[in-house]
Image (spheres, rainbow, N blue to C red):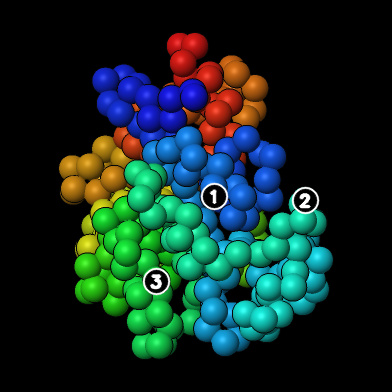
């Protein structure tokens, strides 16, 4: 199989299968997609986790069911029994799966499981215990990430590896409105509610260095940040390589989400990410991106 952990510019990089998508033959986040990844021992795959009304742990990305399944309404209104009756629109022979199913398939393999925890409300003690219990058999191959740093602290205390997506603290997205977090745009084009972001006495580097330290303080245990590609590229244009700054602090950087833009454009984006110190690229098109990288 195409190498999904290539060495680029003297450093090993990893292409992570977003929503367990490898060939694209199977519904994203489905057990069939996970199984395909595990059978060929991809280095890393990502799945999305949502808690249901009865605290069951469903592998699903969106908050609503209608775009990808035979169901309708909010995901978190379901219980396990109801979720088991739903099928993916992409593959109506395939039912939705749960975290326990994924762990069963992945045990005994070598693939790193990245769990994207979607929960924003404070995680209950019961949910924390259930999540830890299910993941315990493959604890050394699990990385749990979230924008909700407050929900990762308890997992870190239990010895799980955790990763922070700092989107709620800062991000670059000039096309969006103010009805999200953060709510104010700073002097260097970043959505960021901190006073530092609006202080013109900070140079771009001083601002980015300061905020990197601030945000790391929210979850010092995070071994990785997961940051969107637009934000990483914007920082690079202002002569700040986020991955290198994080590496100096003992933290890795993963970039999301790279799509196949054609060979030239995909390689241009990937080259910029690697130059910024990105070690992992999360992508829906891992095989094609890897093929482009092999041709370098």
Real-space CA distance between mark 1 and mark 2, rounded to the nearest whole angstrom:
15 Å
Residue located beneath label 3 in the image: 134
Depicted 210 relative to depicted 129: above or below: above
Instruction: Please determine whether, in this image, residue 64 is positioned above or below residue 173.
Output: below
CB atoms at circles 3 and 1 under 8 Å apart?
A: no
The residue drawn where x is 68% and y is 45% is: 26
Residue 120 is situated, as x and y percent measured from the top left of the image, at 49, 76
Residue name at image x 32 percent, y 53 percent: 141
Which residue shows up at 29% across the image and 45% down it? 252
Picture disc at residue 90: 2
Q: Which mark is residue 34?
A: 1
Q: Secondary structure at mark 2?
A: loop
The image's mark for residue 233 is: none
Distance Cα–Cα, label 3 vs label 2: 28 Å
**In the depicted structure, whether residue 225 falls above or below residue 119:** above
Q: Residue at x 54, y 79 (%)?
A: 56
Alpha carbons under labels 3 and 1: distance apart:
17 Å
């Amino acid at each position: 199989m195409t190498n999904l952990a290539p060495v680029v510019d003297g450093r090993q990089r990893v292409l992570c299968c977003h929503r367990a998508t490898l060939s694209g033959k199977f519904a994203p986040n489905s057990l069939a997609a996970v199984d395909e990844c595990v059978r060929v021992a991809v280095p890393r795959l990502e799945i999305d986790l949502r808690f249901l009304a009865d605290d069951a742990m469903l592998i699903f990305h969106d908050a609503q069911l209608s775009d990808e399944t035979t169901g309708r309404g909010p995901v978190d209104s379901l219980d396990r029994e109801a979720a088991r009756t739903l099928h993916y629109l992409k593959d109506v022979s395939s039912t939705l799966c749960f975290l326990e199913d994924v762990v069963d398939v992945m045990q005994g393999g070598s693939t790193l499981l990245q769990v994207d925890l979607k929960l924003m409300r404070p995680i209950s003690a019961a949910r924390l215990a259930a999540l830890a219990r299910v993941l315990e058999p493959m604890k050394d191959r699990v990385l749990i990430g979230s924008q909700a740093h407050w929900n990762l602290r308890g997992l870190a205390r239990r010895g799980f590896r955790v990763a922070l997506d700092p989107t709620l603290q800062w991000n670059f997205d000039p096309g969006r409105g103010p009805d999200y977090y953060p709510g104010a745009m700073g002097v260097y084009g970043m959505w960021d509610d901190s006073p530092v972001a609006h202080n013109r006495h900070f140079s771009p580097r001083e601002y980015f260095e300061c905020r990197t330290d601030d945000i790391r303080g929210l979850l010092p245990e995070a071994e990785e940040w997961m940051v969107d590609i637009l934000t990483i590229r914007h920082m690079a244009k202002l002569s700040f390589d986020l991955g290198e700054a994080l590496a100096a602090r003992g933290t890795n950087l993963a970039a999301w989400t790279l799509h196949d833009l054609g060979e030239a454009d995909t390689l241009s984006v990937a080259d910029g990410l690697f130059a910024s110190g990105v070690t992992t690229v999360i992508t829906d098109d891992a095989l094609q991106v890897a093929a482009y990288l092999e041709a370098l």
